[in-house]
Amino acid sequence: MTGLERLLAGHSAGKGDGVIAFYWPIKDEPDLRSLMIEMQASGRSIALPLVETRAAPLVFRLWTRETRMERGHWNIPVPPRDAPEVMPDVVLAPLMGWDSEGYRLGYGGGYFDRTLTALSPRPFSIGVGLAAAQLSTIYPQPHDIPMDVILTERGTEVGG
């Protein structure tokens, strides 16, 4: 069992009772697609985020291994518009940098921060990245939202 599986097992969505929002990896982001496939095959509901409107919160659509993906914003594969929209209980967010307060840096755009601010209730948020990406601070701005947990290959770094 991976650190992420253990972390999710302690949360209702990890037991199959909720929706876990993964992300489709780009560039050097950690690739969790094999875990998405395993969790979906075991009956869990998996969603993927997509940019439906620029500079607005993300939308989450259900994903299965059979989902016919389309190219979305930044050319990232996303579920099609006819896939059911869902509200996640857990959101996994890739990070390119993070600090000990749980703040993360992504590729820009502020989509995850904007989304976490808009969702009510706010989903449990897990930043996923590499331990080597830790920074002394990301100099968070008022709009930045800290993750509940930062998870790296070393395990839980923040929260948990």
Image (cartoon, grey):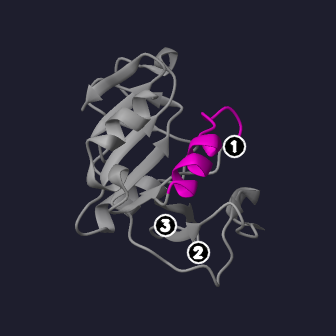
Q: Are marks 3 and 2 in contact (CB under 8 Å)?
A: yes
The magenta-colored residue range is 26-42
Within-10-Å neighbours for mark 2: few <14, some 14–19, many 20+: some
Residue 32: quadrant of the picture: top right
Looking at the rendered structure, the secondary structure element under dot 2 is loop
> Element type at marker 3?
loop
Q: Of residues 99 and 59, which is closer to you in this image?
A: 59
- Tell me the quarter of the picture where residue 150 sits: top left
Task: Please state the horizontal and vertical placement of residue 11, each as a whole percent of the image.
Answer: 27, 48
Visible residue check, residue 61 = yes
Q: Amino acid at mark 1?
A: Ile
Which residue is depicted at the point 43% across and 19% down?
A: 134
Dot 3 amino acid type: Leu
Q: Which residue is mark 1?
A: 26
Quadrant in the picture for the C terminus: top left
User: Marks 3 and 1, how far apart in space?
Assistant: 17 Å
Residue 57 within the magenta-colored segment of the rendering: no
The residue pinned by badge 2 equals 52
Say if 87 sits above or below 104 in the image: below
Residue 33 painted magenta: yes
Give the labeled residue for mark 3. 58
- What percent of the width, then of the height, locates residue 76? 71, 57
| Residue 40 or residue 85, whichever sits in front | 40
Residue type at mark 2: give it.
Glu
